[in-house]
Image: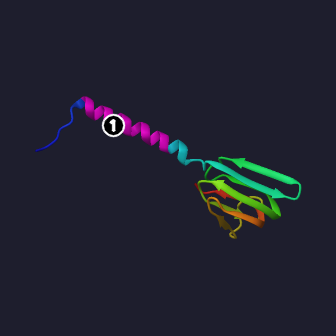
Amino acid sequence: MRMRFSRRAALVVTAGALALSFVNLSTASAAPGVVLMEHGDQFKEVRDPNGGQCYPGLGPDTAIANRTGGTILLFPDGGCKTKILNPLGPGEFRPDENVGSFLALD
């Protein structure tokens, strides 16, 4: 026995699927949460960092916490350009990193 959808049911299912795909696209572009950095008396926080965007860090000897749902890459330079990068996963903290910049992956 085959199940058939009426034309109206098919349109409702298609519209629902499209709506969900737009919701997923908008939330996939940012890692919800916050990245916290501290270096001496300097403090910086980046809320919901956008995936693929480079953010400046606070340099050597920076304490950094990734309180987002995604991985970030730490770079020693200020423009996320060096081939030396260091991943920091969700929920991870490091007390002494060289953070010239960071890039959110997801």
Check the image and report above or below for 76 versus 104.
below
Q: Is residue 43 visible?
A: yes
The region drawn magenta spans 8-24
Check the image and report above or below for 16 versus 85.
above
Residue at the spot of label 1: 14
Look at the image and name its color scheme: rainbow
Q: Residue at x 37, y 36 (%)?
A: 16
Q: Is residue 76 visible?
A: no
- Badge 1 marks a residue whose secondary structure is helix
Q: Quadrant of the C terminus?
A: bottom right
Residue at the outermost left position: 1
Q: Residue at x 78, y 62 (%)?
A: 63
Q: Residue at x 82, y 52 (%)?
A: 43
Q: Main secondary structure of the magenta part?
A: helix
Residue kind at label 1, given as amino acid type: Thr
Residue at the outermost top position: 8
Q: Is residue 21 left or right of residue 85?
A: left
The crowding category of the residue bearing disc 1, from other C-alpha atoms within 10 Å (few below 14, some 14 to 19, many at least 20), is few
Q: Residue at x 21, y 32 (%)?
A: 6
Q: Specify whether residue 91 is painted magenta.
A: no
Residue at the outermost right position: 41
Q: Quadrant of the N terminus?
A: top left
Q: Is residue 103 left or right of residue 106?
A: right
Check the image and report above or below for 84 versus 106.
below
User: In terms of depth relative to the viewer, which is nearer, 93 or 14?
Assistant: 93
Q: Specify whether residue 9 is painted magenta.
A: yes
Give the x, y percent position of residue 58.
81, 58
Q: Is residue 71 left or right of residue 14?
A: right
How many numbered discs sit on the rendered protein? Answer: 1
